[in-house]
Image (spheres, helix red, strand yellow):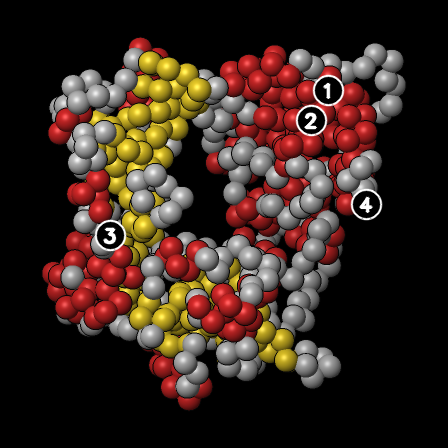
């Protein structure tokens, strides 16, 4: 299969808005494409390919050798997407008669070609491909497809080749490697289920649906339990013994990435022969620290002894999925919880404890606990609670996000009114609209200081309104960034919602927001009535206020 066939698939997926339409495109592609090409396409779509030497800087350098750098910069500013810009502007050399590469050629070559030789190889490929092929190639090697297809949808398409359910694919997925010949053969009924003999396997995570305004009215409180939802990252910890009798232990992210290398202190702390589902936190002197503190330990392949000592990692367990040879996931939650409590008590390691249950008999009682965790059992850790998890007592642990068994009810977001200061065009479908915003609040001296950036939360209609405001009220330009009119009597006030706040030395305001988004447009409020930095600082956790 040439890159052109793969490019056609990506192009059609990018323009297909319907989920079922995307599913049909994927299933048809997998059915008519031979191995190993279809497996490599699946790996690309699910994020299973990583080309360490093919970085955006390399691509930018190549195109600037072939075109005027100023023209490229202007084009990139207008288009908003690196791969699309290069695909359109690339001036192919005349007389190149080589056939376009296959997907297998691209993957194998990128895996074996040194950094010095890669520019020449990439330029030759770009010369042999048309605009769509170049776009697909660049999207592939930079790892940012952005075609509206989740890994779950791609696996559902594989299941559609036969009589399998998507959950069956999830069960074996993390023991497989591209190009997945055994997986496709199983899906098509040509072979048995792929075996996974990993002694510390990842189990696909069970997720919860958010509580909506009318959700609780349709639920019977007595059928559910509740526990605190901690502000860390969801992890899975697994341990076992391999065929050589050696202990194997791993820590996984929610999506199955192995993050063990950054957390040797936790790997060593795990009980033998179990799989735990829990929250990764940092505990100092028995107290849960802010997410900002946890971030110092994240996204590291290795960690120093100094950081291990200053930021001790901790698992607060939610669930027990496997114990010895027993798969506990089909059991009711209450039974798994009882076994988890017994395990944690017997293990007695200071780096692992159990998440507290939140007692309640009515939804009103749980509402009160959610609003005031400190007075309902969370104590000194209340600032690290981001809501409650509500779970049916009889719920099995199943992959994905089934609606009904589990619900998440996050605490109400923090809100401030801030003034729009800068705007930048988005990427992909938003490349023609100013959709990325920097906003600020007033200092005691009467100046605006930036406190955050947001690029979502608004409706399509609100996006058009902000875009029109930006274009009409631009006062200055800094490359692709537009400065928008902002003063005490002129400007646009945005209501900004965010999940948390922490001190930051990297930001001029001294604070950084978690998950900021535009909640609504405050056309009714003049800029001088926007919030102050003092007001924002008052929202910091108690231990971080100056």
- Using the image, tell me which numbered label, if any, was put on residue 437: none
Mark 1–mark 2 Cα distance, whole angstroms, equals: 6 Å
Q: Determine which quarter of the picture holds residue 496.
A: top left
Which quarter of the picture shows residue 331? bottom left
Q: Residues within 10 Å of mark 4 (few under 14, many from 20)?
A: few
Measuring from the top left, give residue 539's x and y in whole percent: 21, 49
* Cβ atoms under marks 1 and 2 closer than 8 Å: yes
For this rendering, which residue is in front, 224 or 378? Answer: 378
Residue at left offset 59%, top offset 62%:
302
* Image position of 463 with respect to 287: above or below: above
Disc 2/disc 3 C-alpha distance (Å): 43 Å
Find disc 4 in the rendering and name its residue.
Answer: 112
CA gap between label 4 and label 3 equals 49 Å
Task: Judge from the rendering whether residue 337 lies leftward or rightward of residue 13; answer left or right.
Answer: left
Mark 1 or mark 3, earlier in chain? 1
Residue at left offset 66%, top offset 53%:
187
Q: Mark 4 near mark 1, Cβ–Cβ under 8 Å?
A: no
Q: Would you name the residue on which mark 2 appears?
A: 61
- Graded by Cα atoms within 10 Å as few (under 14), some (14 to 19) or many (20 or more), the crowding at tag 1 reads few
Question: Looking at the image, do the residues carrying marks 2 and 4 touch, with CB atoms under 8 Å apart?
Answer: no
| x, y percent for residue 429 | 47, 24
Q: Which mark is residue 540?
A: 3
Q: Earlier in the sequence, mark 4 or mark 1?
A: 1
């Amino acid at each position: 299969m040439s890159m052109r066939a793969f490019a056609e698939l990506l192009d059609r997926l990018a323009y297909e808005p319907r989920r079922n339409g995307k599913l049909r495109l994927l299933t048809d592609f997998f059915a008519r494409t031979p191995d190993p090409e279809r497996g490599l396409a699946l790996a690309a779509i699910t994020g299973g390919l990583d080309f360490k030497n093919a970085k955006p800087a390399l691509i930018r350098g190549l195109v600037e050798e072939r075109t005027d750098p100023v023209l490229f910069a202007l084009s990139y500013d207008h288009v908003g997407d690196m791969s699309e810009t290069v695909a359109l502007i690339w001036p192919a050399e005349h007389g190149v008669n080589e056939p376009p590469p296959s997907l297998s050629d691209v993957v194998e070559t990128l895996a074996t070609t040194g950094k010095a030789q890669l520019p020449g190889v990439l330029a030759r490929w770009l010369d042999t491909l048309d605009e769509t092929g170049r776009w697909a190639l660049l999207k592939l090697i930079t790892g940012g497809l952005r075609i509206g297809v989740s890994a779950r949808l791609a696996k559902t398409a594989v299941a559609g080749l036969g009589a399998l359910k998507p959950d069956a694919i999830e069960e074996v997925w993390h023991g497989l490697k591209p190009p997945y010949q055994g997986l496709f053969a199983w899906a098509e009924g040509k072979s048995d289920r792929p075996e996974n003999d990993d002694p510390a396997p990842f189990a696909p995570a069970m997720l919860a649906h958010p509580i909506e305004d009318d959700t609780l009215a349709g639920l019977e409180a007595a059928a559910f339990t509740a526990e605190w939802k901690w502000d860390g990252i969801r992890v899975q910890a697994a341990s076992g013994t391999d065929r050589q009798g050696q202990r194997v232990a791993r820590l996984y992210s929610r999506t199955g990435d192995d993050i063990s290398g950054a957390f040797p202190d936790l790997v060593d702390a795990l009980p033998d022969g179990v799989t735990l589902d829990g929250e990764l936190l940092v505990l100092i002197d028995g107290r849960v620290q802010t997410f900002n503190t946890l971030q110092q330990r994240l996204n590291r392949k290795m960690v120093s002894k100094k950081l291990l000592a200053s930021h001790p990692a901790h698992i607060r367990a939610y669930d027990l999925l496997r114990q010895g040879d027993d798969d506990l996931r089909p059991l009711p939650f209450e039974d798994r919880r009882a076994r988890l409590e017994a395990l944690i008590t017997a293990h007695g390691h200071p780096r692992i404890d159990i998440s507290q249950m939140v007692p309640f008999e009515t939804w009103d009682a749980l509402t009160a606990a959610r609003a005031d965790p400190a007075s309902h059992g969370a104590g000194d850790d209340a600032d690290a609670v981001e809501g409650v998890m509500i779970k049916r007592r009889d719920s099995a642990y199943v992959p994905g996000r089934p609606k009904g068994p589990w619900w998440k009810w996050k605490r109400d977001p923090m809100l401030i009114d801030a003034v729009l200061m800068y705007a930048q065009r988005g990427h992909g479908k938003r490349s023609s609209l100013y959709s990325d915003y920097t906003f600020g609040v007033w200092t005691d001296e009467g100046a605006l200081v930036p406190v955050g950036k947001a690029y979502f939360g608004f409706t399509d209609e609100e996006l058009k309104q902000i875009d029109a405001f930006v274009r009409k009220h631009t006062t200055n330009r800094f490359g692709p960034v537009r400065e928008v009119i902002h003063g005490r009597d002129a400007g646009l006030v945005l209501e900004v919602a965010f999940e948390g706040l922490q001190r930051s030395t990297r930001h001029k305001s001294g604070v950084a927001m978690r998950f900021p988004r535009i909640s609504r447009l405050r056309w009714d409020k003049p800029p001088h009535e926007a919030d102050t930095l003092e007001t924002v600082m008052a929202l910091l956790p108690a231990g971080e206020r100056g």
